[in-house]
Image (cartoon, grey):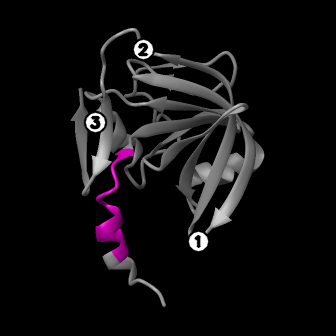
Amino acid sequence: MTVEPGHYRAVAARLPGAVCVVAVRWRGSLHATTVSSVASVSLAPAQLLFCVHADARLSDALADVDLWTLSVLAADQGPVADWLASPGRPTIGQLDRVPHTVSDTTGAMRVDGAAAWFDCRTAAIHPSGDHLIVVGDVVGADASGSAAGALVHVRGHLRPVP
């Protein structure tokens, strides 16, 4: 028994997901993409996971690089999420329009103004269907000092959460 993919997508769209940006430094350049399948896995050791399409540029980078940063986007950062989810965006200069700071720990970018960030080292990558489940050991984390809220993806739309 299987569920038709279009029907599954419509039903699964009702699962709200935190909108985040995962970034790596790969082949001398910063690369980033928007993800919304993110979860805390463990407190001891501190771990989180995210899912990324197996054909994504980030999947290629993660095969070579084990350090990455995940920024939890603030409620007002929808344009950042949209841009970094855009297919066909250029590799060179893709982050020119995204205010960011480079992490001393991972060499990847942290989105300025994000609600929180996590610096991680890949603990495991599990192929699953057309995606990869990437589990990371958290090696650094912090939350924004502001009441930035967060951004969620539900029913095909980005929605701010205060």
Query: Which quadrant is the C terminus positioned in?
Result: top left
Say which quarter of the image contains residue 147.
top left
Q: Residue furthest top?
A: 145
Residue shown at 23% from the left, 34% from the top: 160
- Spatial CA span between label 2 and label 1: 35 Å
Say which quarter of the image contains residue 120.
top right
Classify mark 1: helix, strand or loop: loop
109 in the magenta segment: no
- The numbered disc on residue 129 is 1
Q: Which residue is mark 2?
A: 144
Q: Which circle's residue, 1 or 3, is located before the other in the chain?
A: 3
- Spatial CA span between label 2 and label 3: 17 Å
Q: Which residues are magenta?
A: 8-17
Few, some or many residues within 10 Å of mark 3 (<14, 14–19, 20+): some
User: 83 or 10, which lies in front?
Assistant: 10
- The numbered disc on residue 17 is none
Residue shown at 67% from the left, 53% from the top: 60
- The numbered disc on residue 78 is 3
Please name the amino acid that badge 1 sits on: Gly
